[in-house]
Image (tube, rainbow, N blue to C red):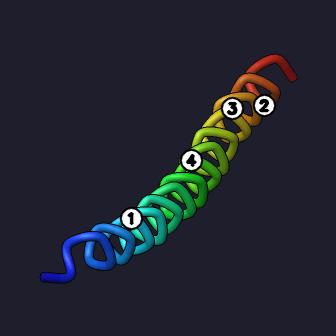
Amino acid sequence: MKRAGNSEENKKVRKMFFKQKLKNSFWRNIVSLYKAYRKLERILDDWYTIAI
């Protein structure tokens, strides 16, 4: 039985998976921030044109 070796492998895989998940959520956050910024920019643009 190779239980010990198997658990080490599982740890490695889990760590890789976690890193990948973290990276994905990081990029998703950047994208959502960018979208929010664009929306805000549009709103401010509208306000600016209304003010003038």
Q: 33 and 5: which one is in front?
A: 5
Decide: is 36 above or below 23. above
Mark 2 in CB contact with mark 4 (< 8 angstroms)? no
Q: Which residue is mark 4?
A: 29
Give residue 42's quadrant in the image: top right
Mark 4 or 3, nearer chain start: 4
Foreground label between 4 and 3: 4
Q: Which residue is mark 3?
A: 46
Residue at 38% x, 64% y: name it.
Answer: 11
Mark 2 in CB contact with mark 3 (< 8 angstroms)? yes
Where is the C terminus found, in terms of image quarters? Answer: top right
Residue 25 picture location, percent across and down: 49, 53
Q: Residue furthest right?
A: 52
Dot 3, crowdedness within 10 Å: few (<14), some or many (≥20)? few
Mark 2 or 1, nearer chain start: 1
Mark 1 or 4, nearer chain start: 1
Q: Amino acid at mark 3?
A: Asp
Mark 2 or 4, nearer chain start: 4
Q: Residue furthest bottom?
A: 1
Find the distance from the CA under tag 4 to the CA under tag 3: 26 Å
Foreground label between 2 and 1: 1
Mark 3 or 1, nearer chain start: 1
Q: Which residue is mark 2?
A: 49
- SS for callout 3: helix
